[in-house]
Image (cartoon, rainbow, N blue to C red):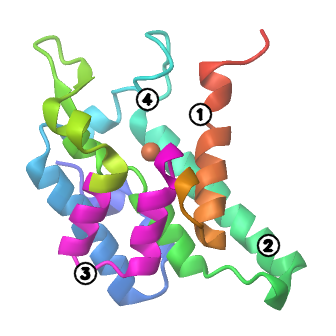
Amino acid sequence: MVSMKELWPELEWISDIELREKTAKTWELALERSVLTPDDLQRIPFTLLAGPDLKVSFMDHKRAVVHIARESGLTFNEFFEDKLPVNMNVLIAGAILADVGKLLEYELDEKGKCFQGKYGEYLRHPFSGVSLAEQCGVPPEVCHIIASHAAEGDLVKRSVEAYIVHHVDFMTFLPFKDKIK
Ligand SMILES: [Fe+2]
């Protein structure tokens, strides 16, 4: 069984110990309730919306988003400083948790292929993710990132950390789905 440290080495980047623990706990709770195992997460594609040929795994995409979000936050803080400060702990926790709700959204068919289950049809992962995170005591500024990272979030005013996670998520998704060949 893969440990949380092996699944998410990036948890180390959250310097606020309490927030780091709440973030890890949310992933543990999601895995407890999910049909998916950590091994499945290394195998299944990161989205069901980019066709059957997509080979990038769920974990490779999620971890790439966290890495790029962190680099973006550091760049904001270097160039914009106090004019647009980015809270790095909030940003990293939000990026790690943005898709945690997908563990409840997905189900597996008899061949081990993922599909969106009934629960996920009613409650997409921005909603189920907030629910899981709140049960683990994750603060509202981080839940806000989960809530607003996808298209649903276009209807709310986003924090700077949420803007970063939203754009990183989409720039690492849209070219897989649709680009000039
Ligand atoms: Fe998402």
Pointer 2 residue:
76
Say which residue label 3 marks.
137
Give the residue type that dot 4 points to.
Thr
CB of residue at label 2: within 8 Å of ligand 1? no
Q: Is mark 3 within 8 Å of ligand 1?
A: no
Residue receiving disc 1: 173
- Real-space Cα separation, disc 1 to disc 3, in angstroms: 29 Å
Q: Which residue is drawn at 59% across and 33% down?
A: 173
Asked if the stretch drawn in magenta spans residue 152, the answer is: yes
Distance CA(mark 4)–CA(mark 1) = 8 Å
Q: Are marks 1 and 2 in contact (CB under 8 Å)?
A: no
- Sequence-wise, the earlier of marks 1 and 3 is 3
Is 132 on the left or on the right of 157, as rendered? left
> Is the CB–ligand 1 distance for label 4 below 8 Å?
no
Residue linked to disc 4? 47
x and y percentages locating residue 114 in the rendered image: 25, 23
Q: Is residue 143 magenta?
A: yes
The spot of residue 141 in percent (x, y) is 46, 78
Q: Do the residues labelled 4 and 1 touch (CB within 8 Å)?
A: yes
Query: Residue 52's image quarter?
Result: top left
> Residue 164's x, y, as percent?
66, 61
Identify the residue shown where x is 43% and y is 32%. Answer: 46
Mark 4 or mark 3: name the one nearer the start of the chain. Answer: 4
Q: Is mark 3 on a helix, strand or loop?
A: loop
Judging from the image, what secondary structure is the residue with disc 1 in?
loop
Q: Check if mark 2's residue and mark 3's residue have beta carbons within 8 Å.
A: no
- Give the spatial CA distance, label 1 vs label 2: 22 Å
Compare residues 86 and 59 and report the one nearer the observer: 86
Residue 140 drawn at (x, y percent):
39, 79
Segment colored magenta: 128-153
* 141 horizontally vs 119: left or right: right
Earlier in the chain: of badge 1 and badge 2, it is 2
